Image: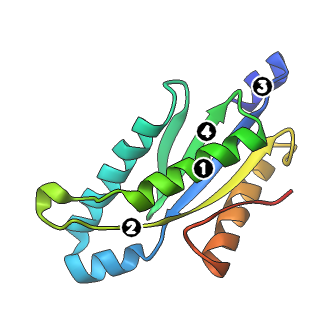
Amino acid sequence: EIQRSIRYSTSVSLIFMDLDYFKDVNDVHGHLVGSKLLAEVGQFLLGQLRSLDIVARYGGDEFVIVLPQTELNGALVIADRMRENIEDSVFLQKEGLDLKITASFGVASYPETADSKESLIKIADDSMYNVKKNTRNGVYAII
């Protein structure tokens, strides 16, 4: 997507998202429930985005969201909307659990805050960890 943004002189943004206190879900309800929660969250995220956006599980309880043709301010709005929608939703109702969760988001944008694929990933990841370390259930971008 960075190559495409260079070619067409557009921005591409990256969001790192980590579920807050996911370990507690695994500890209390077991890893099978944790896996079901991750699958449901992934589907939930897809429903929040455009068809050209990309959602992928990055590892553990982290997801990455690639937003082509999206500048930093737009990505921050999208991340905060997803954060609010996750906070306002109830997950795993079909399993009878009615789980309420929150998530932490880090945002970066090429070429606004990053100058390469590697720096885009690092800045989004560092931004997410800033939220996890300080507040949780928030959105942050290193500018």
Whole-number angstrom distance, CA of label 4 to CA of label 2: 22 Å
Q: Where is residue 11 in the image (x, y as percent from the top left)?
A: 78, 31
* First reached walking from the N terminus: tag 4 or tag 3: 3
Whole-number angstrom distance, CA of label 3 to CA of label 1: 20 Å
Q: Position of residue 91 (x, y in %)?
A: 27, 58
Whole-number angstrom distance, CA of label 3 to CA of label 2: 34 Å
The amino acid sitting under disc 4 is Val
Whole-number angstrom distance, CA of label 2 to CA of label 1: 15 Å
| Residue pictured at 27% horizontal, 67% vertical | 99
| Residue pictured at 63% horizontal, 35% vertical | 67
Q: Position of residue 110 (x, y in %)?
A: 81, 39
* First reached walking from the N terminus: tag 4 or tag 2: 4
Which image quadrant: the C terminus?
A: bottom right
Residue with the mark numbered 2: 101
Identify the element where label 4 is drawn: strand
The crowd level at tag 4 (other Cα within 10 Å; few <14, some 14-19, many 20+) is some
Q: Can you name the residue that lies furthest to the top here?
A: 8
Residue with the mark numbered 3: 5
Residue with the mark numbered 1: 79
| Residue pictured at 52% horizontal, 56% vertical | 83
| Image depth: mark 1 or mark 4 in front | 1
Whole-number angstrom distance, CA of label 4 to CA of label 3: 12 Å
Whole-number angstrom distance, CA of label 1 to CA of label 4: 11 Å
The amino acid sitting under disc 3 is Ser
| Image depth: mark 4 or mark 2 in front | 2
